[in-house]
Amino acid sequence: MDTCEHIDQIDPNVKPAGTECRECREEGTKTVQLRMCLVCGHLGCCDSSEGMHATKHFQQTGHAVMTAYPDRKWKWCYVDKKYL
């Protein structure tokens, strides 16, 4: 694991915004794994899912750091493309 300049975007009190990928539910697609934005709590599906909504959230907002959800065993920076 490493650090990056985007780690300061993380809100230490962030809570998940829901219990599922809202976009997958609305589109009727299957979520493979969830990722939680560590800036705002958005829950989106991983890149193995059809919608890739966690990555799309980053592209739309610039929120660079996410974590696996619900276990939070690792963090990922989209900008630096590395685990934190």
Image: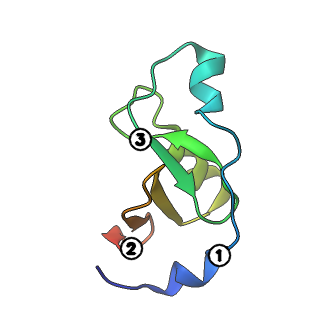
Residue sitting at 62 percent across and 28 percent down? 23
Q: Earlier in the sequence, mark 1 or mark 3?
A: 1
Residue sitting at 41 percent across and 41 percent down? 46
* Type of the residue with mark 3: Cys
Q: Nearer the viewer, residue 57 or 16?
A: 16
Crowding at label 2, few (<14), some or many (≥20) Cα neighbours within 10 Å? Answer: some
Q: Closer to the camera: disc 2 or disc 3?
A: 3
Measure the C-alpha gap from mark 1 to mark 2: 20 Å
Q: Are marks 1 and 2 in contact (CB under 8 Å)?
A: no
Q: Are marks 1 and 3 in contact (CB under 8 Å)?
A: no
**Which quarter of the figure has residue 58?**
bottom right
Q: Closer to the camera: disc 1 or disc 2?
A: 1
* Type of the residue with mark 1: Pro
User: Residue 25: x percent and y percent?
Assistant: 61, 20
**Residue 12 badge:** 1
**Which quarter of the figure has residue 20?**
top right
Quadrant where the image shows the C terminus: bottom left
Q: Is residue 3 left or right of residue 56?
A: left
- Residue holding disc 3: 46
Secondary-structure class at tag 3: loop
Q: Nearer the viewer, residue 59 or 16?
A: 16
Q: Closer to the camera: disc 1 or disc 3?
A: 1
**Residue 80 badge:** 2
Q: Earlier in the sequence, mark 1 or mark 2?
A: 1
